[in-house]
Image: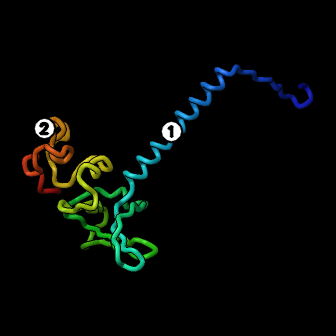
């Protein structure tokens, strides 16, 4: 078309090409959703929440922007206070200017998130200092029902 200065082309495809395009779109969409799910899990915290009548305690995943960038420590210099509408990050002690902030992702004896799920979310388990490859090779109880106990796999201790 010479009127608008642009050229339009008619694109024709065969049925086979359309099916390939749809399969490619589905595959890319599935990858994007899996990626978004993994990001959400790795950036969320498990919180125990009481039901409105206080009869049941449930575990909910909550996203806490900016808090998710804090590193884990068993001796953190911050703590969270939860309220109905928001969560507040507080200093556990005086913090010097420029000092890194740390948060405790999970207490070592906490069973809100089992160790194997904690590992898949955050890439480590608090208190376990043995390399993951050794834990998997030795079929550790962290990952396998009939594996060795946590004491045998180097559990305990922490940052």
When asked about the image quadrant of residue 49, the answer is: bottom left
Residue 65 locus on image (x, y percent):
43, 60
The residue nearer to you, when weighing 55 against 16, is: 55
In the image, residue 147 sits, relative to residue 18, either above or below, namely below
Quarter of the rendering occupied by the N terminus: top right
Res. 99 in view:
no
Q: Crowding at label 2, few (<14), some or many (≥20) Cα neighbours within 10 Å?
A: some
Q: What SS does tag 1 mark?
A: helix
Quarter of the rendering occupied by the C terminus: bottom left
**Residue 30: mark:** 1
Instruction: Work out which residue is located at the far bottom of the displayed protein and give it.
Output: 53
Q: Crowding at label 1, few (<14), some or many (≥20) Cα neighbours within 10 Å?
A: few
Left or right, 55 with reference to 126: right
When asked about the image quadrant of residue 15, the answer is: top right
The residue nearer to you, when weighing 111 against 71, is: 111
Left or right, 147 with reference to 56: left
Res. 67 in view:
yes
Q: Which residue is mark 2?
A: 138
């Amino acid at each position: 078309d010479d009127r608008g200065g642009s050229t339009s082309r008619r694109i024709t495809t065969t049925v086979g090409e359309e099916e390939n395009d749809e399969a490619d779109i589905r595959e890319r969409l599935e990858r994007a959703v899996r990626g978004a799910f993994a990001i959400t899990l790795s950036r969320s915290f498990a919180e125990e929440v009481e039901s409105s009548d206080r009869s049941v305690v449930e575990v909910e995943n909550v996203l806490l922007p900016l808090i998710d960038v804090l590193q884990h420590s068993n001796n953190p210099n911050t703590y969270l206070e939860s309220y109905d509408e928001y969560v507040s990050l507080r200093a556990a002690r005086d913090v010097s200017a420029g000092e890194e902030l740390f948060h405790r992702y999970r207490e070592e004896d906490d069973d809100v998130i089992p160790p194997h799920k904690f590992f898949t979310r955050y890439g480590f388990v608090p208190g376990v200092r043995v390399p993951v490859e050794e834990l998997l090779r030795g079929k550790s109880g962290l990952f396998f029902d009939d594996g060795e106990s946590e004491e045998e796999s180097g559990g305990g201790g922490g940052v």
